[in-house]
Amino acid sequence: DATIVVYNQDADTIGNNRLQITNPEGAKRDYKGLEITASKRFRNNWQGVASLVWSEMAVTQSTLALGVLGTFDSPNGAINALGRDEANQTVQFKLQGTYMFDFGLGVSGLYRFRTGTPYTRELSVSGLNQGTFNVRAEPRGSSTPDNVSTLDLRFEQRFFAPAQLGLIVDVFNLFNSNASVDEGHITSFNYGETLSVLSPRVVRLGLRYTW
C-alpha cells in the first residue's frame, strides 16, 4: 500500500569488501522504562509479590540478530530503520502469591501478562545487481502479535511423619491460552500468518521428600 525506493548496487563494486570500524551517524538505542513492585512478606499464612514494567525502546539498530540487512550495511538497510525494538514488550505484569492452610496444603499461583513482541513487515526485492534481499516495508516494530496472559498454579499437600513428604500438582497455562506468539513478516508470502502459539495446558505431578 505504499511506494518504497530501494537502491541498486554499482555492478563494479560487487564482490568488493571494505571494513570500517566506527560509530556511524544515526545509530540509536533509546530506552525509557518504569518499574513498580509491591511485596507482602509471609504473615497470616500468605505472601505475595506484584510487579509492573512499562517500557519503550526506539532503535535504529536492533538488539536482536534479524534477517533483514543491517542498518549500516547499505542504504537499503536504513529504510524504515527507526522504530520499536523487536525485543521490547511494552507492558509486563506479574502477580504471584502463596497461601498455606492449617492442614498442610499450600497453594501458589503466578499470573503473567505481557504485550506481544513487535516485529517488522518486510518486502522481498529481486532483480538488482546485489541479488535478492529484504527491506522493511513499514517502520521497525509496527506489527504486534497477540498479548499473552497465563496463570500457573501449584498445589502441595505436606505430610510430616516421620519426615516431610509433599505431594505436588503443577498446572501450567491453566486456561489453555493459544495466543499467537510468532507471525510471518514477509509481504505476499506469510505476513500475519501464525507461525507458533503458546504452549498448551500442562499438568505435572511430583513428589517431594525432605529429611
Image (cartoon, rainbow, N blue to C red):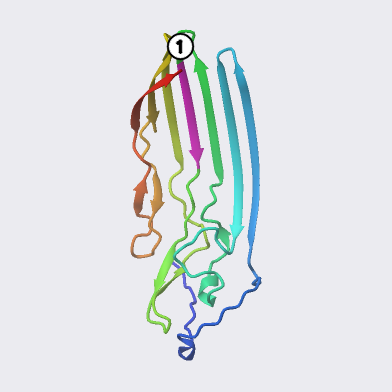
- Would you say the magenta stretch is mainly helix, strand or loop? strand
Q: Name the residue rendered at 43%, 26% in the picture.
A: 153
Q: Nearer the viewer, residue 73 or 159?
A: 159
Amino acid on which disc 1 is placed: Gly
Magenta region: 106-114
Q: Nearer the viewer, residue 111 or 84?
A: 111
Establish if 67 lies above or below 127. Answer: above
Question: Which residue is at the far bottom?
Answer: 12
Task: Answer with the quarter of the image where residue 203 lies.
Answer: top left
Return the x and y of residue 176 as percentages of the image width and height. Answer: 35, 34
Return the x and y of residue 36 as percentages of the image width and height. Answer: 64, 35
Establish if 78 lies above or below 139. Answer: below
Q: Nearer the viewer, residue 202 or 86?
A: 202
Q: Dot 1 corresponds to which residue?
A: 104
Return the x and y of residue 183 as percentages of the image width and height. Answer: 39, 54
Split into 4 quadrants, where in the image is the N terminus?
Answer: bottom left
Element carrying mark 1: loop
Establish if 1 lies above or below 58. Answer: below
The answer to whether residue 107 is magenta is yes
Q: Name the residue rendered at 57%, 21% in the picture.
A: 47
